[in-house]
Each structure stands twice: as C-alpha cells, then as structure tokens.
Amino acid sequence: MMFAGSLRPEKNLPALFNAVAQINGAELFLAGDGPQKSELMQLAADLSLAVTFAGRIPNPQLPAEINRSQIFILPSLYEGHPKALIEAMACGAAVIGTDVDGIRNVIEPEVTGLLCPPTVAGIQSALERLLADSQLRARLGRAARAFAVQHYSLDKIVSRELALLQKVQDNW
C-alpha cells in the first residue's frame, strides 16, 4: 500500500496507520515529508507497523514506486485537486480515496476506485476488500488509467489552458 503527499493533519494519516495496523502482514510505503513526520514515526513504532518513510521522491521516480504497490490510498479529510491521486490513476494503480470533497470529484465509486469514509474502520474495510480481490484491483486500475488519460493527459490540459486564456483575452 502506498500514500504520496504531505505528512500533514488534513491527510488523516493516523487513521490510515491504525487501519493498516489491523491488517495482518500489511506494509505501508509513504512518499512525502511534512510537519507530522516525527509524530507518525512514533505512531508506527507504537503500533508495530511496517512503514517505509521514503521522504520526497522526485516526480520522474514516482511512477515506479506507485507501480510497486498493489494499492494507492489517499485518506484525506479534504482535498483541493488531488494530483497524487490522479498520478496514481494514470499509472493504472487500484486507488482508494476517502469520500470527501476533491477526492469524490475524481474517483467514480466502484468504477475507477473505491471511496470510503475517512475513519479507521472505513479505510480498513476498503483496504481489506482490495487486498483480497486481485481481479477487482486489476479492473479498477485499468479504468482509473483510462479515466486519467481521457481527462488529464497533457494535450487535454493544454487545450483547457488555451481555452481559458482565450476566454480571458476575449473578456479583456
């Protein structure tokens, strides 16, 4: 399982740690850094949780790390535009996100990923479901990649930016 992002309270990582701690043999890979790192390291030790704190990973290396993980999870309490989630989807990862603003705008439940409550029990249940079903992981990963390519490929983003700039110029 993998998380990528800032180690901050709004990312709800203590709930993720407590959920993963309930799953026998589960390991967590964290890409990122932030003010909650020492607190999370202590929590991992207290829970006897196998966590790799990888720190910041350069963007060109991030897809390789995502592809090593069976599941990408974003357990946030809120999000704006969840770029790490979209990057994981573009890699074809099976994704789980909490059912909060920002994330629910990107994941189509049961089609491109799973949405769960931002609670320990909700996160644990979604993780256990994906860990137990390789066919579901594969299906969600394929659909997530197709969604990311369709909506967030470079040509789509450039076209949207140009349209926005044209609109601004027309209204100037």
Image: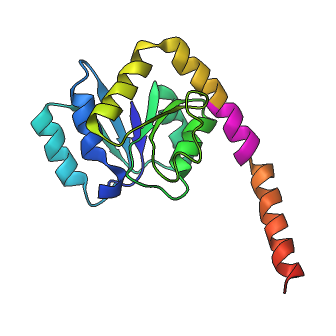
Looking at the figure, which quarter contains the N terminus? top left
Task: Give the answer, above or below, for where 119 lies relative to 27.
Answer: below
From the viewer's perspective, is 103 left or right of 164? Answer: left
Q: Position of residue 63 (x, y in %)?
A: 55, 37
Question: How was this image coloured?
Answer: rainbow
Q: Residue at x 55, y 51 (%)?
A: 83
Residue furthest left as drawn: 46
Would you say 96 lies left or right of 168 here?
left
Rendered position, 30 above or below 78: above
User: Is residue 94 something one can see in this rendering?
Assistant: yes
Give the x, y percent position of residue 126: 39, 27
Asked whether 148 falls inside the magenta stretch, the response is yes
Is residue 3 highlighted in magenta? no
Residue at 40% over, 51% down: 56
Give the quarter of the image for residue 130. Answer: top left
**Relative to 2, 172 lies left or right:** right
Q: Is residue 28 visible?
A: no
Q: Residue furthest right?
A: 170
Viewer-nearest residue: 80 or 108 = 108
x and y percentages locating residue 22 in the rendered image: 22, 25
| Most common SS among magenta residues | helix
User: Residue drawn 40% across and 13% down?
Assistant: 132
Specify start and end residues of the magenta stretch as a single range. 144-152
Picture quarter with the C terminus: bottom right
- Counting the numbered discs, the total is 0
Q: Residue at x 84, y 74 (%)?
A: 167
**Quarter of the image holding residue 74?**
top left
